[in-house]
Image: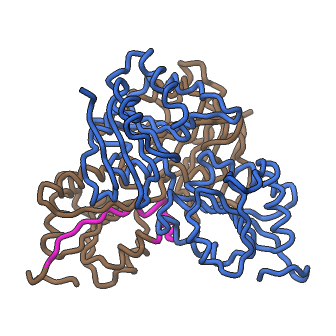
Chain colours: A blue, B brown
């Protein structure tokens, strides 16, 4: 119960990954836990229709959005603890999976300091599912027997230096939070002689407004300038991008633009 | 309807990833699609309780298990097409996610040759969720800003040579199908001077009989010999393994053994 009184409050924290955006891509376990929420702290990448499944719960938006207070991670950690202590069953609802660049484990560690029980319910990670729903399997026999998932941007806003190493891998490379670093990523791949590596940019993956553009390292900047797909976007580099075809209906893509520039 | 007659059969194929084992870790979309099955082709890593949600559907086991016919991938591709043509709504139910070493895209490509519509419903991949449910986040601020997922064993049974490159990565390395290659993996890491890399083996992840052992590259073989956890197991290598603690209740682990050998 959403209640301000203090009787019988049993603080409890559950981290739920809500998946890439399509509301039905939350797990059964995640949805069941959400329905029992007394309070929900949610991010900007969460499908807002999910909140309707907890009509009585207090909802607190802690994502980054114009006109809203921007919470630091430390503030979110504390707000989550305070919410559990005050209301009982606190849900931390995130896009994707809580442990894939979601900083969820920091929230678990903070809750432990207060001896508040925590549970983690995995979510469908955008890193695998967004390429899949656009028609790109991260692994495919003879093309890719591994995949590397990397955040392009570090906490200080700089590019992740580890991207340099991805140019030497044979498997698929999936880059999250990379749209604003596209020029730098292309430059790193070019410097390492990977001008012909196949690359795709997938915006709003899994949603009706999904958009995909693809090409090669040598051409993608020009393709993107013509068709500047919006954030959030997942970048995929590797041979498996060649499996992408025009298949709007099957994979729910609004727009698929592919090919090299002439 | 499960029917042998030919009236109004509209062939359709849906690939569903059922997650790491816990029945509730299937997505809402996956469960809804499963309920409409006329026929289900399922693997050995699928939680069999899921089949109860499609009581009328014909069920065909196509995994590898003693006493059952071992299907080749080509036979499964064709059986899936034939099942859709004969029964209508054919579901391909796999453990984890269909595109993470699941060979799902081969099934999609084969179905397309017959103009059978296909849909792919992502699943919770063991590569991320099994470590998470054992208390190991694949990413964690300041410890890991990337993770690499690799199959230890190639189609021909040999070790994946790409494992060599994982010794040079700063992020988390997640190795699937690697238990039978543990000695070779340890040897590769030792040869590359990574004797102190932290490593964990997680068996039956997400299930009540989950078991976890951990140590360092230098010690894990001896720890494993003392406590030979069974297949299937996920191997995690990296600094994030150090976040693992004895937390049986929270993360549903039956047994957590950790530490270096004396």
Residue at x 81%, y 48% (from the top left corner): A74
Residue at x 62%, y 50% (from the top left corner): A99
Looking at the rendered structure, the number of numbered marks drawn on it comes to: 0
Q: In the rendered view, does B156 fall on the left or right side of B46? A: left
Residue at x 55%, y 64% (from the top left corner): A47
Q: Foreground residue, A17 or A255?
A: A255
Point out the image quarter for the C terminus of chain A. Answer: top left
Give above or below for B165 relative to B28. above
Q: Position of residue B98 (x, y in %)?
A: 36, 55
Can you tell which quarter of the image residue B85 is in?
bottom left
Task: Report whether residue B254 is seen.
Answer: no
Q: Which residues are magenta?
A: B9-28
Q: Position of residue B218 (x, y in %)?
A: 63, 28
Can you tell which quarter of the image residue B17 is in?
bottom left
Q: Foreground residue, A221 or B235?
A: A221
Q: In the rendered view, does B237 fall on the left or right side of B29? A: right
Question: Magenta includes B18?
Answer: yes
Give above or below for B220 relative to B103. above
Question: Magenta includes A29?
Answer: no
| Residue positioned most to the left | B6
Q: Position of residue A31 (x, y in %)?
A: 57, 72
Q: Position of residue B39 (x, y in %)?
A: 25, 74
Task: Report whether residue A46 is seen.
Answer: yes
Residue at x 75%, y 53% (from the top left corner): A107
Point out the image quarter for the N terminus of chain A. Answer: bottom right
């Amino acid at each position: 119960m959403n209640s301000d009184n203090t009787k019988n409050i049993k603080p409890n924290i559950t981290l739920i990954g809500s998946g890439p955006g399509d509301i039905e891509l939350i797990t059964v376990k995640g949805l069941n836990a959400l329905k029992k929420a007394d309070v929900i702290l949610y991010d900007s990448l969460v499908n807002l229709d999910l909140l309707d499944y907890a009509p009585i719960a207090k909802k607190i938006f802690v994502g980054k959005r114009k006109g809203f207070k921007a919470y630091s991670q430390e503030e979110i950690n504390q707000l989550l603890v305070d919410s559990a202590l005050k209301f009982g069953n606190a849900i931390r609802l995130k896009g994707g999976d809580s442990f894939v660049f979601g900083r969820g484990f920091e929230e678990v560690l903070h809750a432990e300091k207060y001896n508040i029980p925590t549970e983690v319910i995995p979510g469908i990670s955008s890193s695998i599912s967004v390429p899949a729903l656009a028609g790109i399997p991260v692994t495919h026999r003879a093309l890719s027997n591994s995949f590397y998932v990397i955040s392009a941007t570090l906490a200080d806003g700089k590019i992740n230096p580890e991207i340099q190493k991805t140019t030497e891998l044979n498997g698929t490379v999936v880059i999250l939070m990379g749209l604003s670093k596209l020029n730098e990523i292309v430059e790193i791949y070019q410097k390492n002689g990977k001008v012909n590596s196949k690359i795709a940019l997938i915006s709003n993956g899994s949603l009706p407004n999904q958009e995909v553009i693809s090409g090669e390292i040598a051409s993608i900047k020009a393709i993107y300038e013509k068709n500047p797909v919006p954030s959030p976007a997942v970048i995929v580099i590797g041979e498996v991008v060649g499996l992408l075809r025009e298949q709007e209906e099957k994979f729910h893509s609004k727009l698929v633009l592919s090919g090299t520039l002439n």
